Amino acid sequence: MPRRIVAVACLALALGAAGCGGGDGGKSGASRPATATGPSTAPAPSPQDVARYRSEVAKATQTFAQGAQRFRDAVGPNSGSRQVASALEAFQADVRSAADALSRLQPPPTVAAAHRQLIAAFRAIASACQPAIDAGRSGDRSRLRSALRTFQAQLNGPLGARAQEAATRIDAGLARE
């Protein structure tokens, strides 16, 4: 079920963006093209190794998706600044946990570059939460709204595109295994 990775990653990004509130953020299309990798000298992974990898990636992206869902459920139009900051901190922790789980995996050679790209995208998303967390902690609602709009634009634009591209490349590479 290789398409599961893309579906979960796309769902998670949509849910994360939905919880941020304000504006549509616009589409950026700022993703980078896939880079070619040289021929691999490593032995081909067994079907069991590929299945195990696919399962572990699905678990990591599910952690991301669940964090996005919890954030969306915890934040509403009447949420206080500190409540939003707390919910974003929890989301940030889930995103970091997903990236850490991915970093412990040994991907098949055909998806190694995309695997690293997904880890980097998750880490960038976690970092992008910080300005909104800081604004929420300060209690400055105007600054928080601005930071959330920026964060949502990043998720809907370059950060989301990088994560989706990586997940798509992983799926495509695993389909060839």
Image: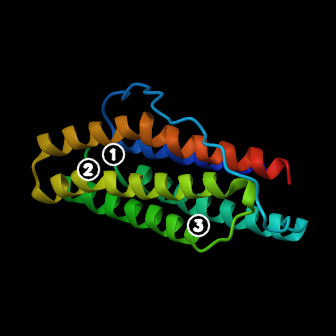
Q: CA distance from mark 3 to mark 2?
A: 32 Å
Q: Quadrant of the C terminus?
A: bottom right
Residue position for label 3: 102
Q: Position of residue 147 (x, y in %)?
A: 22, 43
Which tag is nearer the camera, tag 3 or tag 2?
3
Mark 1 touches mark 2? (CB < 8 Å):
yes
Which color scheme did the rendering employ for the protein? rainbow
Q: Which mark is residue 76?
A: 1
Indicate the secondary structure of the residue bearing disc 3: helix
157 with respect to 46 (left or right): left
Q: Position of residue 52 (x, y in %)?
A: 78, 69
Residue 139, by quadrant, is bottom left
Between 168 and 10, which is closer to the camera in this rendering?
168
Which residue type carries mark 3? Answer: Leu
Q: CA distance from mark 1 to mark 3?
A: 31 Å
Which residue type carries mark 1? Answer: Gly
Q: Position of residue 150 (x, y in %)?
A: 28, 38
Q: Name the N-terminal-most of marks 1 and 3.
A: 1
- In the rendered image, the residue lying farthest to the bottom is 104
Indicate the secondary structure of the residue bearing disc 1: loop
Q: Position of residue 86 (x, y in %)?
A: 28, 63
Mark 1 touches mark 3? (CB < 8 Å):
no
Tell me if I can see residue 7 in this picture.
no
Residue position for label 2: 79
